[in-house]
Image: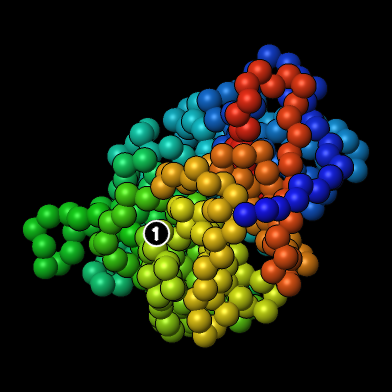
Amino acid sequence: MSYSLFPQTWQLMYKEDFLSNDRLKCNQIIQKGDSTIIVRLRTDNLIIIYEHSKKEWSYITKSEFWKCLRNDSLYNVYKKSDIWDLFIDSKGNYWFTIPDTLHKTTPLFKVTPDTAYIISQIYVKALDDYADIDPFPNKTIRNIKEDKNGDLWLFLLSGIQMKDSAYSSEYMILCKFANNRFESVFISNTYYRFISKCNFVFDNQNRVWFVYGDSCFVIKNDIVEKSFSTRDAEYGYGYFSDLAVDSKDNFYATSNYLFLYKYDGYSLTVDRRILDIENNITNIGPTYWMRIDSLDNIWITGYNSCNLYKIDTAGVLTTYEVPKFDTTEVEWCYKSLMEI
């Protein structure tokens, strides 16, 4: 397959300019207004913030961040902990969790301007009862997002003992915050080793497009409206990974094989062009990312290459070569995260 590399202007931000004695250790990137927020792991400067208009960096240490709990005893428990899945909702509240290994349950934190809440249970409708958020291997809480009505949604994996069972089993659960609690909307005990990077997105009708493994479920008014699988596309297979919905409610998803799936409301199709360029792709697929911009252009990072791919609304594929930093010591192109 032939393709062209297009020139592009890049602003390279050398780590040495803002972290002279440490690695970036980036766990999450958040675009909020004029600022880029980077959440870090295993370091005292927990959060670093870049204000684009001022071209200035600022820092929030772990000790400064955990003072949000406003409780000395809780502060002493969590003051050395990293944070995961930081989400800032439309009211300015902070939602986040911590690594699973520290406690018997995995708490979800909600921090408002006035107080802090620790959520350690969800309400499971099938039980008509609460269940602890039990630590799950690798990562329990996966995603926290807000829909167009301002409702909070949570996707997690947790052990639950159902009424007809004598044992606890692992379930994947999609929850919605209602009645001052997270209530299960969709629950299944199907387990996949592959971990999707996104899990759910919202469209303009405020429907939830939720994926797990090779299946996608479209949820409207808390009820599954339709579902489909990667196998429903011609020559389709693999697991859904990164997700996006454009302004016309077309649904896009990469797979662990770097297929790009598109569902237009009627049919599911597969675009293999990027896979053909990245011809040595493996089935691991955790190191590439997809995002959509305000003009409905799809952006995907390469897997084996230093390429950045753009697919416009006409389906035209453009390939940009990402430049390497002068300080790069190896040929491999490291791609940690991408946000728009």
Q: Is residue 48 above or below residue 329?
A: below
Q: Residues within 10 Å of mark 1 (few under 14, many from 20)?
A: some
- Relative horizontal placement of residue 285, taking residue 54 as reference (left or right): left
Q: Nearer the viewer, residue 248 or 324?
A: 324
Q: Which kind of residue does numbered mark 1 sit on?
A: Gly
Q: Nearer the viewer, residue 70 or 243?
A: 243
Tell which residue pokes out farthest to the right in this image.
54
Q: Nearer the viewer, residue 248 or 162?
A: 248
Residue drawn at x 49%, y 45% as measured from the top left: 281
Tell which residue pokes out farthest to the top in this image.
21
Residue 2 coordinates in the image, percent (x, y): 67, 53
Disc 1: which residue:
238
Is residue 148 visible to us here? yes
Helix, strand, or loop for circle 1? Answer: loop
Tell me where residue 130 sits by quadrant. bottom left
Q: Nearer the viewer, residue 170 or 298?
A: 298
- Relative horizontal placement of residue 119, taking residue 152 as reference (left or right): left
Residue drawn at x 56%, y 43% as measured from the top left: 303
Residue 27 coordinates in the image, percent (x, y): 57, 37
Residue 101 coordinates in the image, percent (x, y): 36, 34
Tell which residue pokes out farthest to the front in this image.
2
Residue drawn at x 50%, y 42% as measured from the top left: 280
Residue 209 coordinates in the image, percent (x, y): 50, 71
Tally of numbered tags:
1
Residue drawn at x 52%, y 68% as measured from the top left: 270
Q: Is residue 263 above or below residue 256?
A: below
